[in-house]
Image: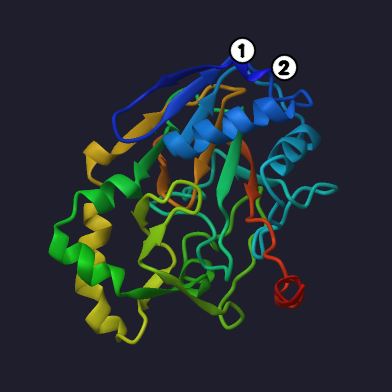
């Protein structure tokens, strides 16, 4: 399979493209992986249709783009701890991933991407919205950009995965542990420069950003609320309607997403692998290379 078979169609102005001409269950060539990664970086979220992926094949696919994350609060599949099964049973009221957010910003080294595969979808509803945080940043005034570039933000899993958080609420088919008292706080720049494109994006997260570094929670709230509202403006978004076998691969460094909970009394079953950044070289190695 070579990248010459790939067909890429943009789906919205701000972000998003659908890719056809590739079977993701196969052992992809380096050339094809490079072409998919280039589309992922350019379009921020990419979609595939009519795929058939076993958990092992999804793990193999994800590992072509980086080491895979094992979620610290959600149990993975037996035999495949990297695979998170995201299931909403007909009797469940709250879905996992509802509300705007990006994945895993509560980690010291946040995930770069998430690959979500649709196993079973409801008869209606269950779409996912995506929002470009690069487009959000570019729409800000020069004065606010300058202010934000001097700020860092504090991210933590405590609020979302505490007993009162949405993600920690009991579900029939998912095992989620409560994080309160065990999750750390990590600091990330409010304006993130994408390491592969150099494009700047806002990096705040309604689920996990709790305040600005050096500011109190009360002082932080008005500006964070403004940014959270700004970042979901419809003109910066695209919407994906799932079908069984669909795949979405989004860039957590510059994209928010929102899993809609508009299919009461129906089952929705998805599988996700999350791609971490490659480990940074050890300091000792860098020093020895410099000495050489």
- Image coordinates of residue 194 in percent, x first then y, are 45, 53
- Image coordinates of residue 184 in percent, x first then y, are 56, 79
Against 24, residue 42 (above or below) is below
Identify residue for label 1.
Answer: 5
Q: Are marks 2 and 1 in contact (CB under 8 Å)?
A: yes
Q: Quadrant of the C terminus?
A: bottom right
Residue 204 seen in render: no
- Image coordinates of residue 258 in percent, x first then y, are 41, 45
Q: Quadrant of the N terminus?
A: top right
Residue at 43% x, 32% y: name it.
127
Side of 199 where 242 appears, left or right: right
Against 27, residue 291 (above or below) is below
Which quadrant of the structure image shows residue 237? top left
Against 167, residue 134 (above or below) is above
Identify residue for label 2.
Answer: 1
Residue at 44% x, 36% y: name it.
42
Mark 1 neighbour class, 10 Å CA radius: few under 14, some 14 to 19, many 20 or more: few
Against 146, residue 181 (above or below) is below
Side of 157 where 255 appears, left or right: left
> Front-most of 156 and 264?
156
- Image coordinates of residue 60 in percent, x first then y, are 77, 37
Mark 2 neighbour class, 10 Å CA radius: few under 14, some 14 to 19, many 20 or more: some
> Front-most of 121 and 277?
277
Residue at 25% x, 83% y: name it.
218
Q: Secondary structure at mark 2?
A: loop
Side of 80 where 177 appears, left or right: left
User: For the view shown, which residue lies furthest in the right direction?
Assistant: 79
> Front-most of 233 and 181?
233
Render colour scheme: rainbow
């Amino acid at each position: 399979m070579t990248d010459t078979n790939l067909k890429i169609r943009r789906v919205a102005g701000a972000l998003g493209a659908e890719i056809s001409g590739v079977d993701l269950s196969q052992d992809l060539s380096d050339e094809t992986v490079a072409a998919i990664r280039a589309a992922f970086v350019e379009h921020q979220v990419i979609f595939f249709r009519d795929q058939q992926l076993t958990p092992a094949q999804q793990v193999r696919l994800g590992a072509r783009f980086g080491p895979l994350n094992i979620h610290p609060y959600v149990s993975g599949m037996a035999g495949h701890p990297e695979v998170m099964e995201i299931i909403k049973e007909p009797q469940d009221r709250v879905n996992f991933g509802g509300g705007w957010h990006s994945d895993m910003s509560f980690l010291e080294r946040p995930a770069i991407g998430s690959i979500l595969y649709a196993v079973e979808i409801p008869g209606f509803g269950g779409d996912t919205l995506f929002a470009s945080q690069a487009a959000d940043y570019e729409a800000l005034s020069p004065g606010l950009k300058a202010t934000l570039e001097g700020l860092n933000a504090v991210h933590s899993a405590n609020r979302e995965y505490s007993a009162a958080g949405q993600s920690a609420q009991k579900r029939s088919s998912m095992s989620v542990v409560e994080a309160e008292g065990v999750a750390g706080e990590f600091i990330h720049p409010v304006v993130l420069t994408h390491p592969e494109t150099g494009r700047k994006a806002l990096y705040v997260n309604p689920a996990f950003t709790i305040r600005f570094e050096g500011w109190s929670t009360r002082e932080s709230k008005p500006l964070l609320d403004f940014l959270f509202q700004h970042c979901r403006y419809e003109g910066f978004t695209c919407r994906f309607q799932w079908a069984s076998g669909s795949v979405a691969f989004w860039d957590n460094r510059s994209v928010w997403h929102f899993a809609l909970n508009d299919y009461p009394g129906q089952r929705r079953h998805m599988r996700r692998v999350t791609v971490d950044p490659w480990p940074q070289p050890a300091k000792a190695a860098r020093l020895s290379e410099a000495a050489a």
